[in-house]
Image: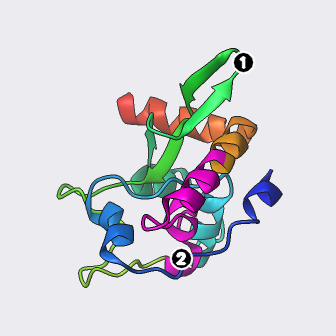
């Protein structure tokens, strides 16, 4: 599943368009392995419930993905949580990403200034999410506690 996503190279673009989601309340969508990579990068020996609930959110706005006979369904999306001002919790006061080397898939692999490659990357991500039981279970677990 992750190998499907490995074909997309990490973005080096830092234009205003590509950074806008960090401040807009819609940080980049995570790939199935991103939570553990982010936790490890931040020095956690394991991903805790407290860390997961504090730093991530379950959203219904993932990319479109074919599920059974429905072609217009949306993949569930795990995204970094946002602060009261709508900015990503991983955005520093100086406007820099604090987890840049392990940023979520959408942040690191989708260029807003290159919609064609971005659309292809998000389609593959939606398929990987659809096929990942762990991702769906994480999404459901976070969603239940956020709405609890």
Q: Is residue 61 visible?
A: yes
The residue sitting at 46% across, 58% down in the picture is 28
The residue sitting at 35% across, 52% down in the picture is 26
Tell me whether the residue at label 1 lies in contact with that at label 2, contact meaning CB atoms closer than 8 angstroms: no
Q: Is residue 47 visible?
A: no
- Circle 2 residues within 10 Å: few <14, some 14–19, many ≥20: few
**32 relative to 61 in the view: left or right:** right
Q: Which residue is mark 2?
A: 42
- Circle 1 residues within 10 Å: few <14, some 14–19, many ≥20: few
> Which mark identifies residue 121?
none
What SS does tag 1 mark? loop
**135 relative to 97 in the view: left or right:** right
- Magenta part mainly helix, strand or loop? helix
Q: Position of residue 48 (x, y in %)?
A: 57, 56
Q: Which residue is mark 1?
A: 68
The residue sitting at 19% across, 55% down in the picture is 84
- Residue 139 position (above or below residue 26): above
The segment highlighted magenta reads 100-123
Residue 122 within the segment the image draws in magenta: yes
What SS does tag 2 mark? loop
Q: Position of residue 25 (x, y in %)?
A: 29, 53
């Amino acid at each position: 599943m992750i190998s499907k996503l490995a074909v997309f190279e990490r973005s080096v673009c830092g234009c205003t368009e590509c950074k806008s989601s960090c401040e807009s309340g819609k940080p980049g969508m995570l790939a199935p392995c991103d939570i553990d990579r982010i936790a490890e990068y931040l020095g956690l020996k394991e991903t805790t419930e407290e860390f997961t609930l504090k730093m991530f959110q379950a959203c219904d706005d993932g990319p479109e993905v074919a599920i059974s006979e429905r072609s217009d369904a949306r993949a569930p999306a795990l995204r970094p949580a946002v602060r009261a001002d709508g900015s990503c919790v991983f955005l520093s006061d100086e406007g820099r990403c604090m987890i840049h080397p392990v940023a979520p898939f959408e942040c690191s692999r989708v260029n807003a200034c290159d919609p064609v490659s971005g659309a292809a990357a998000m389609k593959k991500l939606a398929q990987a999410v659809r096929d990942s039981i762990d991702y769906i279970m994480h999404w459901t677990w976070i969603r239940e506690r956020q709405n609890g």
